[in-house]
Image (spheres, rainbow, N blue to C red):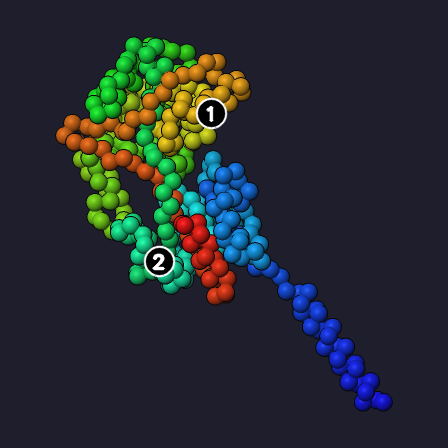
Amino acid sequence: MLKLKLVISLLLLSGLLFAAGQQGEQPMELYIASMNVGLGNEGSDYIMAPFIEEYPEVKLHNVTLNVLDATTMSMDMRIAAGEPIHFYNDYFSRAGKYIIPKSAGGSIWALDLSKYWDDVDDFIPGVLDPYWVDGELLGTPLPNMIVAQYLNLTILAKAGYVPPPMEDWTTEELDIALRKTKSANLPDVLPTMMFALNQSGDWHYMGYFAGQGAEIFADGDYTKSAVNTPAGLKVFETWKMWQDDGLIPPEAAMLADRDFIPLRDAGKLAISGARLGVPIQQNPKRMESLLEQGIIDEPYAMAMYNFPRAPGVDAVPLLTQWNVNIAFGSEDEAVNEVVARVAWHVNS
């Protein structure tokens, strides 16, 4: 009888231990930081839907980043605090700093996606070049938007300027347009605007380098930019002249896109950088919303032009804004495989 009781007790104890183990199992949780692939953001859920269908047991968390000032600041604070992060999608100028190989010995590193993907060769030849580090694919590009200039035709007409066709849009024409706008003394209107408080300024100014014929990565290996060239110097000289002549705000170094975008949307900038693929007036809902909110009193006409070309420059490459996807590694290979799958779905 004692033996029987002992056997029964052991069986009961085993069952309890097994049940405790089952209850203690937690689902895999991944933390996703993204500008355009966020969870629950309008228009982006569909991107993660195939992953969620493939891995219904994985719990995804959306990491909120400070978009207006510095997403990388939010990331750095999170990393320093030891909080988990598994995937990051952001503009290359921001997220590029996290393309770090494991061999660097840092607290975070990027997965070599070539070990997890069997279709790397399907990418357009050359587009992955900036993301290979010492034979490891530490990130992948994600096309985001066209970057060009908005011309507020309503403001320019009031200033007495009619822009030429885009093929004749030159640095000289741009300068004329800015000066005519300033001379017109239109209330609350700026000729143009620059800003440099955060990294978002890059999409606004890179086109000016292209227009002068500067080759930003002339060395070919993407390790450093080459703005210290005659063409690059011309860009800086032009900006300094504009600032001295009151064509851009004197406090440009202290401004960010949070200052710039409201002015552009309110129809207060004659010439402005644009990250959107379609002029605002071609999006009726957008213009309607600006009217309903009282941001504008009447619709305004706009045109989207490529950045102007300088004398001797035959054509200006169309600037595009690229995001980079980075899958962060860990010592848990099972997690790494799933994180790599997140990156694959985002790129697909």
The furthest residue to the left: 312
Mark 2: secondary structure: loop
Q: Nearer the viewer, residue 118 or 261?
A: 118
Q: Is residue 329 visible?
A: yes
Which of labels 2 and 1 is toward the front? Answer: 2
Image-quadrant location for residue 267 = top left
On the picture, is 343 further left or further right than 53?
A: left
Q: Is residue 290 visible?
A: no
x%, y% of residue 71?
46, 42
Q: Is residue 25 above or below residue 203?
A: below
x%, y% of residue 274?
36, 29
Disc number for residue 61: none
Q: Nearer the viewer, residue 96 or 254?
A: 96
x%, y% of residue 187?
41, 11
Q: Is residue 138 above or below residue 39?
A: below
- In the image, what residue occupies the spot 35% across and 28% down? 273
On the picture, is 48 further left or further right than 272?
A: right
Residue corresponding to mark 2: 119
Residue corresponding to mark 1: 286
x%, y% of residue 28?
57, 59
Quadrant including the N terminus = bottom right
Mark 1: secondary structure: helix
- In the image, what residue occupies the spot 47% across and 46% down? 47
Disc 1 residue type (three-letter): Arg
Q: Is residue 219 above or below residue 333?
A: above
- In the image, what residue occupies the spot 33% across and 33% down? 147
Q: Nearer the viewer, residue 4 or 311?
A: 4
